[in-house]
Image (cartoon, rainbow, N blue to C red):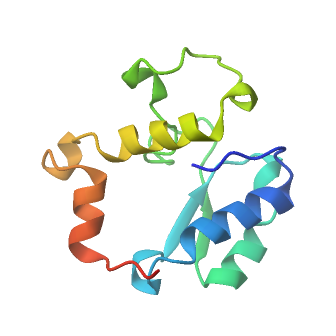
Amino acid sequence: MTKLHNRTSDNVSRAIVSRLVSFPQQARRTLTLDNGSENAGHEKIADCINIKCFFAIPMHLGSAGQMKIPTGLYGVLAKGTDLSKIPAEQIALIESLINNRPRKCLGYKTPIEVASSSVALRD
């Protein structure tokens, strides 16, 4: 999760590239995006970090996988909260809560545990 001042396609593309570039190529093969105009820079993302971009099928439950962030599960933010008013530090905390929550689909491991077991991140 990255706090942006606005959701232009250039800002979104830069944020995605900066977050994913540190992952090894085998750990970032595909990226599923929603159909918002902020993702119009998908070709730039694909070229910069050699990744295939796909788009979720509108109104097709399951085509986007886990794209929607379940912030309500943590009692941190109420639904409909204006994220532009949330400090970057709180956004980082929410990201940590999401990535450290055990998931049934991961055999009750956390996303961090699963990623750490197969990916060595570079500094």
Relative to 16, 37 lies left or right: right
Residue 50 locus on image (x, y percent)? 61, 85
Relative to 24, 46 lies left or right: right
The residue depicted at 66 percent of the width and 29 percent of the height is 86
Vertical side of 74 occupied by 114: above or below? below
- Given residues 123 and 21, the one toward you in this image is 123
The residue depicted at 63 percent of the width and 50 percent of the height is 2
Residue 24 locus on image (x, y percent)? 44, 83
- Given residues 121 and 17, the one toward you in this image is 121
Vertical side of 38 occupied by 80: above or below? above
User: Seen from this angle, which residue lies furthest left?
Assistant: 107
Residue 119 locus on image (x, y percent)? 31, 76
Residue 71 locus on image (x, y percent)? 47, 28
Vertical side of 23 occupied by 99: above or below? above
The residue depicted at 38 percent of the width and 23 percent of the height is 73
The residue depicted at 29 percent of the width and 45 percent of the height is 100
Q: How many marks?
A: 0
Vertical side of 14 occupied by 104: above or below? above
> Where, by quadrant of the figure, is residue 17 drawn?
bottom right
